[in-house]
Amino acid sequence: MTMYVLSLAFFIACVYCQRNRVDLNFEDGRLDAGWRRRLSGGRSLGVTGHVDREGNWGIGASFTFGRKRRSAEQMKLFTLSLEVDKCNFNLYDVDRDDLITKEELVAVFGDNKNTTELFEALDMLSGDGTVNREEFLYVMHRTVEGC
Ligand SMILES: [Ca+2]
């Protein structure tokens, strides 16, 4: 009788609720019942119990949680645009030693013919393989549009 009352209580408590799962199993004179409710954020709450013909019984409870990971398809796509002052010496002097090397210019514009020609133009006063502020200011105004 106790088994039937318990199973009926589980059934009535849970069958009409959404996000609930009820499991009932009666086998070899033992009734196993379980109820699990899904909560938000991947969490769930559960209660299980059993009772047999001899009156032995037991109950248990559980709480589980999980962390959702976003897949690459769910990630938001950002569109960025930057405005920089192309005439600013510090934009190109990455290591802040007051000299612009060809490598620093390549890091900004990429390794191509135009970068090489720009560097050679900027270095034309000293021709020493680096561009100091004085060279930069003098040459940029004369060779780069808008500076
Ligand atoms: Ca430098």
Image (tube, rainbow, N blue to C red):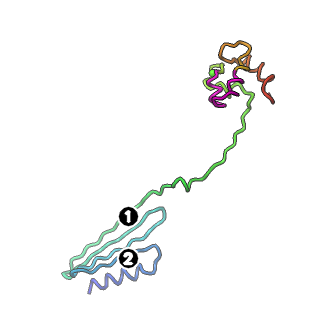
Q: Look at the image and tell me in which quarter the C terminus lies.
A: top right
What residue is rendered at 44% in x and 68% in y?
A: 38
| Placement of 42 over or under 75, stated as above or below | below
Q: What SS does tag 1 mark?
A: strand
Quadrant of the image occupied by residue 26: bottom left
Q: What SS does tag 2 mark?
A: strand
Q: Position of residue 47 (x, y in %)?
A: 35, 71
Which of disc 2 and disc 1 is earlier in sequence?
A: 2
Residues shaded magenta: 101-119
* 113 inside magenta stretch: yes
Q: Main secondary structure of the magenta part?
A: helix
Q: How many marks?
A: 2
| Placement of 57 over or under 146, stated as above or below | below
* The label number, if any, that marks residue 63 in the structure image: 1
Type of the residue with mark 2: Val
Instruction: Name the outermost residue toward the bottom.
Output: 1
What residue is rendered at 45% in x and 81% in y?
A: 16
* 60 inside magenta stretch: no
- Ligand 1 - quadrant of the structure image: top right
Type of the residue with mark 1: Phe
Q: Look at the image and tell me in which quarter the N terminus lies.
A: bottom left
Q: Position of residue 59 (x, y in %)?
A: 29, 72
What residue is pinned by disc 2? 22
Instruction: Classify 10 Å Cα crowding around label 1: few (below 14), some (14-19), many (20 and above).
Output: few
**Left or right of 91 in this view: 138:** right
Distance of label 1 from label 2 (alpha carbons):
16 Å
| Placement of 28 over or under 81, stated as above or below | below
Q: Position of residue 94 (x, y in %)?
A: 62, 26
